[in-house]
C-alpha cells in the first residue's frame, strides 16, 4: 500500500447498549470463543425452539384448503427436501466461522454493500413472520375474550416480546429450555387423541379437496403454486444460524455433538417444520369437518381448538388449553423473529449510515414494522405476500449455496469466509448479480408474463437461475471480486490472543481485527464498518473498481462525465425508493380487493394514479438525497485537502523538530562539558578561599554563596611575615568572567604580600589595579571591582584602603552599630589610581565585632517588594552582637533566608576576644 493518506484516529465511544455484549450479542461481529460458552445441545434446543411457530400450520392449512390434499402434501415434501439441502452448507459454514447470516453473505459472493440488500430481505422475513405469528396469537386472544379487539391483541402480542429479547441469546436459551417440554406435550397430544379417537380423520384428510380446482387429486400447476407459498420458509435458516454461530469450536472430543447440533439445529428444522405443515393441513380438514369455514380453518387457534376438543369434553377447557398452546408457541418463535430482525437491521443500517445505536434499538424498530403490517391485515393476503417474498428469498439462498458447494470447492473463491469491510469489495457480481437476475426473472414469472407454468414454478426458476448463474459469473470474473486486499496481519497470526482496537480501545480476537493503513493501527470490524471518513482508501484504485463502473463509463460517454455519474446514482436511489413504495402500494391493493373484489378495476386505476403522483415526490426526494450526499462529499473532499495540507505542514514541522532535536542534543553535550568545566572552576575557587581563617585574639565566621557556578565575590585572610591581612571584594556582574577576575586579584595580592609583607594597603591596591587593568584591556572585558584591604595592627588597631560596601562595627560597650565608610576607588577602571586611595584606620575594643559583606545581602528582595537593606542588617547585628561570631553569622543568614538573592552573597564576621 503506497502513499495512503493518513487520518488522525479519534476515540469512538459506544453507548451502553452497544458496549454490553450481553445485550448486543455480537450483532455485527464474529462471535469470539470467550462468549461461546453454551453446550452444543443447549444451542440446538434453542435453535429448534423457534420451530414452534404456528405459521407453519397456517401455511400448511392454507395450501391444503386452497390446493387440496395431493398438491399440498407433495409441495410440502418437495420443498422441505430442497430447503434441507440448501440449509446444510449454510449452517456448516456459519457454525465453523462463528458468523451470522449477514456476515456469511458478505463473503459468499455478495460483497460488503451487496449484502445490504440481503440484510433487507432477511429483515423482511423476520417482520413478515413476526406479524403473521403475532396475528395468530391475537386471533387466539380475541377468541378467548371477545372483549379484546384484534388491534389491542396486536399491541399485546408485540410488546410482550421486547423485554424478552432485550438480553439476547442469554435469556432466549433459558426461555426455550424451560418451555420446550410444555410446548412439545401440547403440540403432540391433540394429534395422538384425534388419531386414537377418530381414525377416519386421516382418511378424510387424504380425500380433502378444499377449494382446489383439481379436488383432492394432483395437478402439476397447483403443486407449483402450493410450493411457491411453502418456499417462503427458506430464509428461516438465517434464524437457525443466528443461534448456531455460538457453537463451540469443533474438536476431536465433541465432533459428534457438534455435527448433531449443526444438522438437527440447522437444516433439521425443516423436518419438524414439514411435519407441522402437514399437521396444519390435517387439522384444517378436521376443522372443516367440524363445521368451521375455509376462511377460519387456516387459523391455528381453530385447528388446535378442534384437536383439543378430542381431549377435553368441556369446550371452555379446550379453548383455554388451545389458547395457552398458541401463546407459548408464538412467544417461542417471536423472540427468535425479533432477535433475528434486530441483527438484520443492525447490519443493514450500519452500512448505510455508518452508525450503530445498538441491537436493542433495531429490535424495537422491527417489532414496530410488524405491528403496522398486522394493522394492514397481513393474514388476509398470506398467499400473495409469501408467494412474492419466496421468489426473492430463494434467489438469495440459491446464490449463497452455489458459492459454498460449487465455487469454493473449485477454488475460484477463497476457502474461508471473509466478512470484514477492510478486505471486501463493496459489490461482488457473483452473488449479487445472480440474485438480482434470478429475482427479476422469477417475479416476472410470478406475475404471469411467461405463462401459467412459469408462474406456478417461479420459486424453482429463482433457485436454479441463481444457483447456475453464480458459478458462471465467478468463472468470468475469475473470483477477483471476493477479496479486495489480503489480510497479511492477523489471519495467519500464530499468537491468537486478543488484540487492542486503537479506535474503541477494546480487545477482540484476531478473527475480528484488521489493520487500517489510513489510521495506521489495528481496528476491529465494527469500528471499521462504522467509519465514514476513510472512504475505503485501504484498497487501491484498481481494487476499489466495482463491476458497475462499465455502466458508469457508458453514461459518461453518452451524456457527460459528471452528469453520467449523477444519472446512475439518481436512478439507483429512485428505483430503490420506487420499488419499496410500489410493494407497499401492491400490498394495500391486495388487501383492498380481497375485501371488495367487484371493485378491482376501479381500485387498480386509483392506485396507479396515486402511485404515479407519489413517483414525482419520490423523484424530488431522490434528487434531494443525491444532492445532499454530493454536498457532504464535497465538504469531505475539502476537509481532505485541508488534511493533506496539514499533513504536509506536519511533515515539515517534523523535519524541523528533528533538526532542533539534533541541535538540542549537541547543545546539551556542549553544556554538559561546560558545566563540567564550571564545576572544576568552582572547586578551584573554593580551594583558593580560606575555609577556617584564624587571627590571634579574634573569632571569625565567613561564607560565600555564588549566584552561579562561579562567583565574582572575594574574601581572604592572609597571614604572612608575622602580619595578618583581611580582604573583601566584589567584581561587577557574576559568572565565569567575574570569577576569573576575582582569581586574578586574589593571585596578585598573595604574590605582592609574599614579596613585601609590610606593604601599605594603598600601595598594595595601586599595584594590583595596574595588573588587573592591563589584563582586562587584553581580554576586552569591561569589568571593575570594589575591594577593601585591611591590615591588622596591635591592640585592636586596623589600617585599610579601598572602596567597598561600608563596614558595620558593633561596640560592646555602647551596644551601638557604627558605619565605617570606605572612600577609595574601584580597581580595573583606570591604569593609575594611587592618588585615589586614602589610608584610614579603625579600632576594635574587647567584645566588639565587625561585619564585612557584599551587596548581594543588602540588595536581596523580600516578598513585600523591599530590599533587605543595610539598616535591617545593622539591626540584626545589634540584636545578636553579644553572641559569638558564628552565631552572629548564622542569625544574619537566617534573617536573609526568605529573600530572593540575585547576586553573590559574601558575609565576614569577626569579633575581638582578647
Image (cartoon, rainbow, N blue to C red):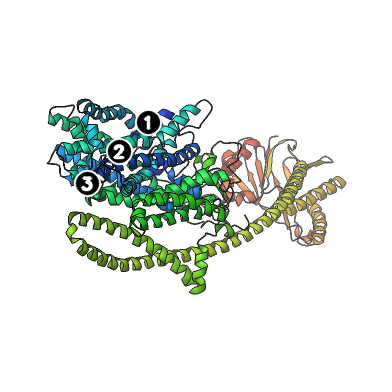
Q: Is residue 719 above or below residue 567?
A: above
Secondary element at tag 2: helix
Quarter of the image with the C terminus in it: top right
Mark number for residue 45?
Answer: 1
Q: Nearer the viewer, mark 1 or mark 3?
A: 3
State which tag comes first along the sequence, 2 or 3. 3
Residue 568's place in the image compared with 402, above or below, is below
Closer to the camera, 111 or 527?
Answer: 111
Q: Label 2: how many residues lie within 10 Å, few (<14), some (14-19) or many (20+)?
A: many
Mark 1 to mark 2: distance in Å?
A: 20 Å
Can residue 47 be seen in this snapshot?
Answer: yes
Mark found first going from the N terminus, 1 or 3 = 1
| Callout 1: SS | helix
Instruction: Name the residue located 50 percent from the left edge and 28 percent from the top edge.
Output: 255
- CA gap, disc 2 to disc 3? 18 Å
Say the numbered circle drawn on residue 277.
Answer: 2
Nearer mark to the viewer, of 2 and 3: 3
Closer to us: mark 1 or mark 2? Answer: 2
* Image x and y of residue 331, in percent: 28, 37
Point out the image quarter for the N terminus: bottom right
Amino acid at each position: 500500500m503506497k502513499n495512503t493518506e493518513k487520518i488522525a484516529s479519534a476515540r469512538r465511544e459506544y453507548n451502553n447498549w452497544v458496549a454490553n455484549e450481553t445485550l448486543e450479542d455480537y450483532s455485527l461481529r464474529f462471535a469470539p470463543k470467550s462468549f461461546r460458552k453454551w453446550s452444543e445441545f443447549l444451542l440446538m434446543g434453542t435453535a429448534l425452539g423457534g420451530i414452534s411457530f404456528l405459521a407453519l400450520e397456517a401455511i400448511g392449512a392454507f395450501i391444503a384448503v386452497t390446493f387440496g390434499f395431493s398438491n399440498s402434501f407433495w409441495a410440502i415434501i418437495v420443498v422441505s427436501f430442497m430447503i434441507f439441502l440448501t440449509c446444510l452448507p449454510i449452517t456448516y459454514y456459519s457454525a465453523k466461522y462463528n458468523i451470522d447470516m449477514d456476515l456469511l453473505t458478505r463473503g459468499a459472493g455478495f460483497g460488503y454493500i451487496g449484502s445490504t440488500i440481503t440484510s433487507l430481505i432477511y429483515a423482511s422475513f423476520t417482520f413478515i413472520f413476526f406479524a403473521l405469528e403475532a396475528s395468530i396469537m391475537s386471533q387466539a386472544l380475541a377468541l378467548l375474550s371477545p372483549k379484546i379487539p384484534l388491534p389491542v391483541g396486536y399491541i399485546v402480542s408485540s410488546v410482550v416480546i421486547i423485554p424478552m429479547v432485550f438480553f439476547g441469546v442469554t435469556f432466549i436459551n433459558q426461555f426455550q429450555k424451560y418451555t420446550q417440554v410444555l410446548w412439545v406435550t401440547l403440540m403432540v397430544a391433540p394429534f395422538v387423541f384425534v388419531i386414537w379417537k377418530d381414525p377416519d380423520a386421516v382418511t378424510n384428510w387424504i380425500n380433502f379437496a378444499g377449494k382446489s380446482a383439481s379436488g383432492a387429486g394432483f395437478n402439476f400447476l397447483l403443486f407449483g403454486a402450493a410450493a411457491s407459498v411453502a418456499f417462503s420458509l427458506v430464509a428461516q435458516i438465517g434464524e437457525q444460524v443466528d443461534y448456531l454461530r455460538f457453537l463451540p469450536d469443533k474438536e476431536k472430543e465433541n465432533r459428534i455433538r457438534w455435527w448433531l447440533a449443526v444438522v438437527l439445529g440447522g437444516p433439521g428444522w425443516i423436518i419438524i417444520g414439514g411435519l407441522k405443515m402437514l399437521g396444519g393441513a390435517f387439522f384444517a380438514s378436521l376443522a372443516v369437518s367440524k363445521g368451521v369455514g375455509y376462511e377460519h380453518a387456516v387459523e391455528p387457534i381453530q385447528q388446535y381448538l378442534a384437536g383439543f376438543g378430542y381431549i377435553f369434553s368441556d369446550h371452555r377447557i379446550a379453548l383455554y388449553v388451545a389458547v395457552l398452546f398458541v401463546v407459548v408457541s408464538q412467544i417461542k418463535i417471536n423472540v427468535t423473529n425479533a432477535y433475528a430482525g434486530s441483527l438484520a437491521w443492525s447490519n443493514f443500517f450500519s452500512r448505510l449510515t455508518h452508525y450503530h445505536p445498538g441491537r436493542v434499538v433495531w429490535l424495537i424498530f422491527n417489532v414496530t414494522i410488524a405491528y403496522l403490517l398486522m394493522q394492514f391485515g397481513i393474514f388476509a393476503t398470506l398467499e400473495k405476500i409469501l408467494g412474492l417474498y419466496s421468489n426473492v428469498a430463494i434467489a438469495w439462498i440459491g446464490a449463497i449455496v452455489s458459492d459454498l458447494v460449487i465455487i469454493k470447492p473449485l477454488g475460484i473463491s477463497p476457502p474461508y469466509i471473509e466478512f470484514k469491510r477492510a478486505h471486501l469489495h463493496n459489490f461482488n457480481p457473483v452473488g449479487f448479480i445472480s440474485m438480482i437476475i434470478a429475482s427479476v426473472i422469477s417475479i416476472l414469472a410470478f406475475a404471469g408474463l411467461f405463462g401459467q407454468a412459469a408462474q406456478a414454478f417461479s420459486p424453482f426458476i429463482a433457485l436454479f437461475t441463481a444457483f447456475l448463474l453464480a458459478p458462471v459469473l465467478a468463472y468470468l470474473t475469475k473470483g477477483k471480486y471476493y477479496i479486495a486486499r489480503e489480510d497479511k496481519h492477523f489471519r495467519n497470526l500464530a499468537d491468537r490472543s486478543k488484540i487492542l482496537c486503537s479506535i474503541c480501545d477494546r480487545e477482540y480476537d484476531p478473527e475480528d481485527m484488521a489493520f487500517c493503513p489510513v489510521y495506521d493501527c489495528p481496528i476491529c470490524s465494527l469500528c471499521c464498518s462504522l467509519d465514514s471518513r476513510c472512504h475505503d482508501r485501504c484498497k487501491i484504485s484498481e481494487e476499489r473498481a466495482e463491476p458497475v463502473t462499465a455502466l458508469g463509463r457508458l453514461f459518461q460517454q453518452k451524456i457527460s462525465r459528471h452528469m453520467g455519474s449523477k444519472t446512475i446514482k439518481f436512478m439507483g436511489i429512485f428505483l430503490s425508493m420506487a420499488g419499496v413504495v410500489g410493494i407497499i402500494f401492491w400490498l394495500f391493493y391486495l388487501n383492498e380487493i380481497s375485501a371488495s373484489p367487484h371493485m378491482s378495476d376501479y381500485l387498480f386505476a386509483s392506485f396507479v394514479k396515486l402511485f404515479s403522483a407519489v413517483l414525482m415526490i419520490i423523484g424530488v426526494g431522490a434528487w434531494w438525497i443525491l444532492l445532499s450526499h454530493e454536498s457532504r462529499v464535497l465538504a469531505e473532499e475539502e476537509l481532505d485537502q485541508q488534511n493533506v495540507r496539514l499533513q504536509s505542514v506536519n511533515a515539515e514541522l517534523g523535519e524541523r523538530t528533528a533538526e532542533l532535536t539534533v541541535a538540542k542534543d549537541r547543545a546539551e553535550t556542549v553544556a554538559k562539558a561546560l558545566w563540567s568545566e564550571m564545576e572544576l572552576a568552582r572547586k578551584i575557587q573554593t580551594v583558593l578561599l580560606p575555609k577556617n581563617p584564624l587571627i590571634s585574639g579574634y573569632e571569625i565566621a565567613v561564607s560565600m554563596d555564588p549566584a552561579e557556578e562561579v562567583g565574582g565575590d572575594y574574601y581572604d585572610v592572609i597571614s604572612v611575615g608575622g602580619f595578618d591581612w583581611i580582604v573583601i571584594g566584589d567584581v561587577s556582574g557574576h559568572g565565569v568572567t567575574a570569577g576569573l577576575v576575582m582569581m586574578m586579584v586574589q593571585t596578585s595580592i598573595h604574590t605582592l604580600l609574599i614579596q613585601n609583607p609590610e606593604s601599605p594597603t594603598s600601595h598594595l591596591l595601586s599595584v594590583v589595579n595596574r595588573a588587573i587593568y592591563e589584563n582586562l584591556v587584553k581580554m576586552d572585558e569591561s569589568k571593575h571591582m570594589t575591594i577593601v584591604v585591611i591590615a591588622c595592627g596591635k591592640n585592636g588597631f586596623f589600617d585599610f584602603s579601598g572602596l567597598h560596601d561600608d563596614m558595620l562595627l558593633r561596640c560592646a560597650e555602647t551596644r551601638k552599630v557604627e558605619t565605617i565608610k570606605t572612600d577609595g576607588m574601584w580597581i580595573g577602571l583606570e591604569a593609575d589610581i594611587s592618588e585615589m586611595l586614602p589610608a584610614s584606620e579603625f579600632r576594635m575594643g574587647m567584645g566588639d565585632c565587625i561585619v564585612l559583606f557584599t551587596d548581594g545581602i543588602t540588595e536581596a528582595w523580600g516578598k513585600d517588594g523591599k530590599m533587605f537593606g543595610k539598616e535591617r542588617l545593622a539591626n540584626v547585628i545589634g540584636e545578636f552582637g553579644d553572641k559569638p561570631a558564628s552565631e552572629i553569622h548564622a542569625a544574619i543568614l537566617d534573617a536573609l533566608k526568605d529573600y530572593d538573592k540575585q547576586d553573590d552573597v559574601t558575609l565576614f564576621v569577626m569579633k575581638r576576644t582578647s
